[in-house]
Amino acid sequence: MPELPDLQLFSNHLHRRLQQRTVSQVTVHKSKRLNVTVEVLAEQLIHAKFAMVKRKGKCIHFHFVNKPILEVHLMLKGGFDLIADDSQVPYKILTLGLDEQEYLVVSDPQSLVTLTFDPLPISVPDALDITLDYLTSQLQSKKTRNIKAFLLDQHILRGIGNAYADEILWYSRISPESLCGRLPPDAVNACFQAIKTVLTEAVQHLETVQPDRLKGEYRDFLKIHNPQKNLSPTGKPIHQKKIANKITFYSDDQYYYK
Amino acid sequence: MPELPDLQLFSNHLHRRLQQRTVSQVTVHKSKRLNVTVEVLAEQLIHAKFAMVKRKGKCIHFHFVNKPILEVHLMLKGGFDLIADDSQVPYKILTLGLDEQEYLVVSDPQSLVTLTFDPLPISVPDALDITLDYLTSQLQSKKTRNIKAFLLDQHILRGIGNAYADEILWYSRISPESLCGRLPPDAVNACFQAIKTVLTEAVQHLETVQPDRLKGEYRDFLKIHNPQKNLSPTGKPIHQKKIANKITFYSDDQYYYK
DNA sequence: GGCCCTAACAACGA
DNA sequence: CTCGTTGTTAGGGC
């Protein structure tokens, strides 16, 4: 459920709180989706000092001084806690003990969270890093695909999930079923601008209203992908339809390029 | 266009006419879809003696004494000629000169015929060789696929083409869109019997009415996949619809297991 | 209409 | 709602 803006919020918060602190204890509660042995992870991270925390697509990267990165993907329902006592946290996957009696906890009621120690570098750009040229050429190379499936494809650009894809397409005035190869340059440019604007403004909004949140989602402020609304900001009715195998919100403001 | 019964007819005819005769000349007119060099084919087949001709799925296998097999797939429009003078045959792909001033010619106006010298053995059974157990287990393993696509899949059973698939399904009283996993044992058995009956009776019919044909097709006697007919043998209207990406004829006699 | 390759899509499980 | 994997399908080229 957490999407790029939520994850950026988590990352910013964790970065502020963890930087320069040291891991004093490593406890793996569920190792099924950990790519190394519990022993290797514990040995590598014990006494490691946090260098920084960054978001990469839908993953959170924990950087340590002179150690490999620990990558966390929260999947559908995973989240973090920074807490003085982890004994009451349910569905724990990983606990990293810190100084001053504090714990960083990764938990997930579905146990789908993936932990990857020393992940391979990925060349696919983050949604906030793409250039207009990149977007244009990628759209051209997927002529028959619909734009919604395109935006959700983490092999093309990383970080956009179901809700923000709908927001981006509404801001671009592009119908989610439009074919990638049919978008005229103006529409491609609108999409490009919308990716940057919608996502960065959402991060800013979340930083303002709930800077300390480390799990869950908050999407009441979304303009289209929002079950509380019936009308788009321009007053057009909002429709719901399964597109790209996901429930999709869109309005008649959006042009269908086919 | 030629399907299993046509190909069986060709094979039978060629077997009768070629057995024990010797290749005196090898001329490759188009080598694009030949898996060995022209030189290798010529060297191997010159002076080779035909042992037998067999149909395998939609392929014709020419067996020679102490030589590898030459496999011919006629694709959509390929055909054979056994003729005293090959100079008037259009679209020639391969000519094998024989004794007594006769030539075996493979031709194809589309140049799609494939020639494979020494083909790898294939484990997929011919449609006329399958057992009821095999059909049952294969159907069970393709639960969500429709039966028409199943019958046409040469990786499951070999030899059935678009026209005879429709005939087999009508004889089985199974709608072409029925899901493989939904067929009850009685329907599976009906399908099994129909595969054998429809195909062998078609071979017998063709052997009776045109035993010497070596190319093209003849399907006026088909009961369902036949543009000349509007009604099935039981008097039900015949419908046409694209199923499994192929134009499909079927009637309301056929039950849709879904 | 035949077959292969590829891209797009759908279903399932983790 | 996420990401693999797998199997099926649709389209173009030979």
Image: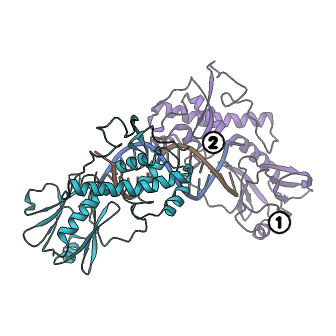
Chain colours: A purple, B cyan, C brown, D blue
Look at the image and tell me whether residue A86 can be seen: yes
Q: Could you tell me residue A29's position as x and y percent? A: 82, 61
The one nearer the camera, B210 or C10, is B210
User: The residue under label 1 is which amino acid type?
Assistant: His
**Secondary structure of residue under mark 1:** loop
Q: Quadrant of residue B242?
A: top left
| Residue at the spot 22% in from the left edge and 72% down from the top edge | B41
Look at the image and tell me whether residue A130 can be seen: no
The residue at the far bottom in this view is B66
Mark 1 nearby-residue class (10 Å; few <14, some 14–19, many ≥20) = some
| Residue at the spot 73% in from the left edge and 54% down from the top edge | A113
- Residue A47 is tagged as 1
Q: Could you tell me residue B121's position as x and y percent? A: 38, 71
User: The residue under label 2 is which amino acid type?
Assistant: Ile
Circles 1, 2 touching at the beta carbon (< 8 Å): no
Mark 2 nearby-residue class (10 Å; few <14, some 14–19, many ≥20) = many
For the C terminus of chain B, which image quadrant? top right
The one nearer the camera, A110 or B139, is B139
Residue A209 versus residue B135 in the image, above or below:
above
- Give the chain letter at badge 2: A
Q: Quadrant of residue B112?
A: bottom left
The one nearer the camera, B100 or A17, is B100
Q: Are marks 1 and 2 on the same chain?
A: yes
Q: Could you tell me residue A48's position as x and y percent? A: 79, 64
Residue A94 versus residue A245 in the image, above or below:
below
- Give the chain letter at badge 1: A
Q: Which residue is mark 2?
A: A160
Q: Nearer the viewer, mark 1 or mark 2?
A: 2
- Residue B81 is tagged as none
| Residue at the spot 77% in from the left edge and 67% down from the top edge | A38
Q: Could you tell me residue A154's position as x and y percent? A: 59, 48
The one nearer the camera, A91 or A43, is A91
